Amino acid sequence: MINSIHSISSAISGAGELGSLSSSGSTTASGLAGGLMGTATPGTPNAPSFSAVMADMATDTIGSLRNAESLSLAGVQGKADSRQVVDAVMNADQTLQTAVAIRDKVVTAYLEIARMAI
């Protein structure tokens, strides 16, 4: 997840719009969309697409959750240190909260677009 946020941050840094960060450190979807829309120029060969960034974030989220689950099972079996388990679970929790916040913002934006008169 940190790598995804870093890649989003570097993609957005050219436009100078990182978006707002909430108190938990998650990036809002409106900030991501505003920053990513401003960085991609048609015909730019190495500009990441919005869907690629979202796919990378989803992959990192799943990896974080799987890591937390495997470390939790190892902790129950006595094979992992409790500190490692707590760190993995807290990281997975933050990752999941970020994913849910982005999903909520995307759904809200979709509903606003659906309400627009044509």
Image: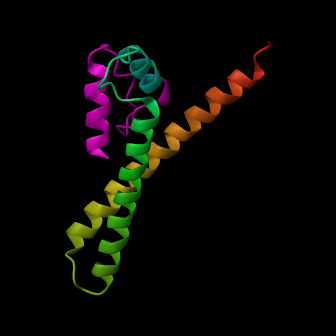
The x, y position of residue 1, in whole percent, is 32, 47
Residue 74: horizontal and vertical position, in percent? 28, 80
| Viewer-side residue, 99 vs 10 | 10
The region drawn magenta spans 1-30
| Whole-percent x, y for residue 17 in the image | 35, 16
89 left or right, relative to 78: right
Which residue is drawn at the image coordinates 44% and 51% (left, top)?
A: 96
Q: In the displayed structure, would residue 77 be above or below residue 51?
A: below
Q: Is residue 79 above or below residue 95?
A: below
Q: Residue at x 29, y 72 (%)?
A: 71
Q: Residue at x 69, y 23 (%)?
A: 112
- Left or right: 40, with 101 as reference point: left
Looking at the picture, tell me which residue is in the foreground, 16 or 36: 36
The residue sitting at 32% across, 31% down in the picture is 8
Quadrant for the C terminus, please: top right
Find residue 66 and report its horizontal and vertical position in percent.
37, 66
Q: Is residue 74 magenta?
A: no
Q: Looking at the rendering, which quadrant does residue 79 occupy? A: bottom left
State which quadrant residue 108 falls in. Answer: top right
